[in-house]
Image (tube, coloured by chain):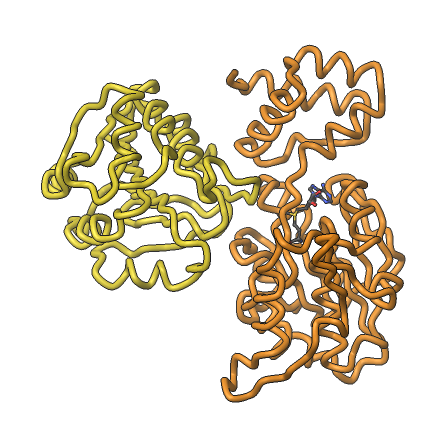
Amino acid sequence: MYKAVIIGGSAGSFQVITRILSSMPPNFPLPVLLCLHRLKHVRSGFVEALSIKSTLPVIEPMDKEQIKPGRAYLAPANYHMYVELGNKIALSTEEVVNHSRPSIDLSFITAAQIYREKLIGIILSGANRDGAYGLKKVKDHGGIAIVQNPAECQVKTMTETSLKMTPVDHIFNTNDIIKYLQKVK
Amino acid sequence: MQITDLDLQYFISSIKSVSKYDLSNYSDKSLKRRLQKVLEDNSINLMTLINRMMGDRAVVEKTIRDITVNTTELFRDPTVWHLLRSRILPRFKNNKTINIWHAGCSTGQEVYSMMILLNEMDMLERAKIFASDINTDVLETAKHGVYKYRFNLNYLDNFDKVIKQNPLNFEEYNDVPYEKYFDIDKQRDTLSMKQFMVDKPIFRKHDLVTEGNIFYSKFDIILCRNVIIYFNYALQNKVFELFHSNLYPKGGLVLGMHESILGPWANKFERLGHAYVKK
Ligand SMILES: C[S@@+](CC[C@H](N)C(=O)[O-])C[C@H]1O[C@@H](n2cnc3c(N)ncnc32)[C@H](O)[C@@H]1O
């Protein structure tokens, strides 16, 4: 019924995303797009760190790579990650957006344009505003908007800004995000 | 303001009708973003831009320059340079000449990185360095080889990783001074390549979409990094054909860290790390 899940996170989201990835059903029927900010100098090792506990393969995709279900695609360091027609990844090194590359907004906006009402967008803990506008676009196109409960977030800025910008479908603690994804089709 | 597919088509066909530029096979998501940025930076709408382009060839040229993404670094992605150092360049160690083409060289950092590495491997004298880009502004910067210093401290980190350290042997440390290749002026905030560096490469304007090989020579190595991410799949394949036919047998093709040959040209190359060698 849905076509993709997209997750954005920044400061304080690493633990959360690790927990989510470790509890995904192994035959998860959708692709998971991950747009996570990382420390400036941590360019490598991130995908390995996420892979350790993940039930899905975590990939830093190549440009124009075909998006397949049951895999997690992590936006590579220093590239923006877009979704293009034909269900392909497209990368870009254009200037930082919201001080970030990858920018969560850009990934969410392009995914929303392609998957429209068949997209589930999730914003996790983070220290800047990146992602809030993107989540609004997911909602505008009829998709599902989920925000991690700010009370549970290590850093609330990203989730609170998202909540101000758009009415969301769910405000979930990590456990509920996990439960929700178990049932997704 | 959101650019629609129709807007984009209109923009592309307008440029096509007044110039030889053809953006129709650019990756549409990033082209849309770039067009939006051009409109916002100039506070104009699409109609105004198109009208101006129709009336003035210089506006087309400027728009093309503004549309391109020119981000680059000295020794960007050190692992690529490790691969060049340990596995690609040694294949040409005994050549009398080594022809290298940097396609989409932007402001030239990649070209100078290559020259530094070649010099450290005693291969620079025998190398011929060709470099091209569609954007004439970045080529001007490339020819001068003068960059901002403070903003680019990672250039020095990268230099250390590639030139001073040996990834295969952590005990080895070559204390190559930066001044061998470039001067740093903290007052002026500049990092400038030495004269012998800027004198060597041949920089030319070249459009990968509409032109063939303009250098009257084939190549031992072609680097085209972070350029084809702005092209769609069909255009990427066209560019691979151009590269394949202009490489010598066993010539090396180096794409960006997250670029690869996914289509029919893949079996005309062998993988070497994440680079390619023409079969
Ligand atoms: C992101 S830069 C890459 C610079 C360098 N190769 C690197 O990886 O650091 C991409 C360059 O491709 C150039 N470019 C875009 N379209 C082109 C075309 N059709 N022909 C030649 N160059 C093009 C742009 O002007 C830009 O300078």
| Residue A156 seen from this side | yes
Residue furthest front in the image: B187
Q: Check the rendered structure and report the hue given to chain A.
A: yellow
Q: Residue at x 78, y 15 (%)?
A: B52
Residue B54 higher or lower than B239, as above or below: above
The percent position of residue B76, horizontal first and vertical second, equals 60, 60
Q: Is residue B202 left or right of residue A23?
A: right
| Residue B83 seen from this side | no
Q: Quadrant of residue B61?
A: top right
Residue B51 higher or lower than B87, as above or below: above
Q: Quadrant of residue B127?
A: bottom right
Figure chain in orange:
B
Q: Residue at x 82, y 46 (%)?
A: B140
The percent position of residue A65, horizontal first and vertical second, equals 46, 48
Q: Nearer the viewer, residue A44 or B54?
A: A44
Quarter the C terminus of chain B occupies: bottom right
The percent position of residue A52, horizontal first and vertical second, equals 25, 64
